[in-house]
Amino acid sequence: MGERLAGRIGVVAALVRSSFLVNAVYAESSREYGLTSQQGQLLCVLMAQPYGMGELGAMLGLAKSSITGLVDRTERNGLVRREPDPQDMRAVRVALTPRGSRLAEEFYVETCRRIEELPAGLSAAERDVLADLLGRVVCDNEVPVVFVEPHRP
């Protein structure tokens, strides 16, 4: 992205700037697949399994009305469907359609590839340290699994 920083930056700036960097990659990838960033996140979350509306709202940090609108728009695009919750007949779960599943997989693979390139200037050992440290921050803060670990060959 532009000029090299003359010195080191602090942890706050590093975390904030790295989140902007990842979000920018995510947004660009989403646009190329005809999705909004939130739709991309929704598809990635649903790759693991169907979820209830409340669970999705909590995982994505969205209010009830926002998650309803997101699911409505994504459903109209034929990417997700609502299905009865077998545990609670008054509730619904959101699941990927076959088309949504294919798109989610393609989007996921491409987005992982792009994010994997971000720390290209680091050695393998530095990448491992970065992953370990960020993993601890994520686990210590109980961040929901909104993007599953890429499959390693």
Image: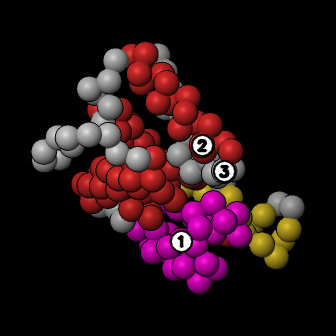
Residue 64 among magenta residues: yes
- The percent coordinates of residue 68 (x first, y second) are 58, 78
- Under tag 1, what secondary structure? helix
**Which residue is painted at 39% across and 53% down in the image?**
13
Which mark sits nearer the N-terminus, 1 or 2?
Answer: 1
- State if disc 2 and disc 3 touch (CB < 8 Å): yes
1, 112: nearer the viewer: 1
The residue most toward the right is 87
* 114 up-or-down from 87: above or below: above
Badge 3: few (under 14), some or many (20 or more) residues near its Cα, within 10 Å?
A: few
Please tell me whether mark 3 or mark 1 is closer to you in this view.
3
Q: Please, what is the three-letter code of the amino acid marked with disc 2?
A: Val
On the image, the x and y values in percent for residue 72 come to 51, 76
- Classify mark 2: residues with Cα within 10 Å, few (<14), some (14-19) or many (20+): few
Q: Which residue is mark 2?
A: 137
Residue 97 drawn above or below residue 111: below
Q: Amino acid at mark 3?
A: Asn
Q: Which residue is mark 1?
A: 71
Image position of 78 (left or right of 132):
left
In the displayed structure, would residue 33 be above or below residue 90?
Answer: above
Name the spot of residue 21 as percent of width and height, x first: 32, 50
**What amino acid type should be assigned to the residue bearing mark 1?**
Val
Q: Callout 1: few (<14), some (14-19), or many (20+) C-alpha neighbours within 10 Å?
A: many
What residue is drawn where x is 69% and y is 50%? 142
Residue 141 tag number: 3
The stretch in magenta equals 54-83
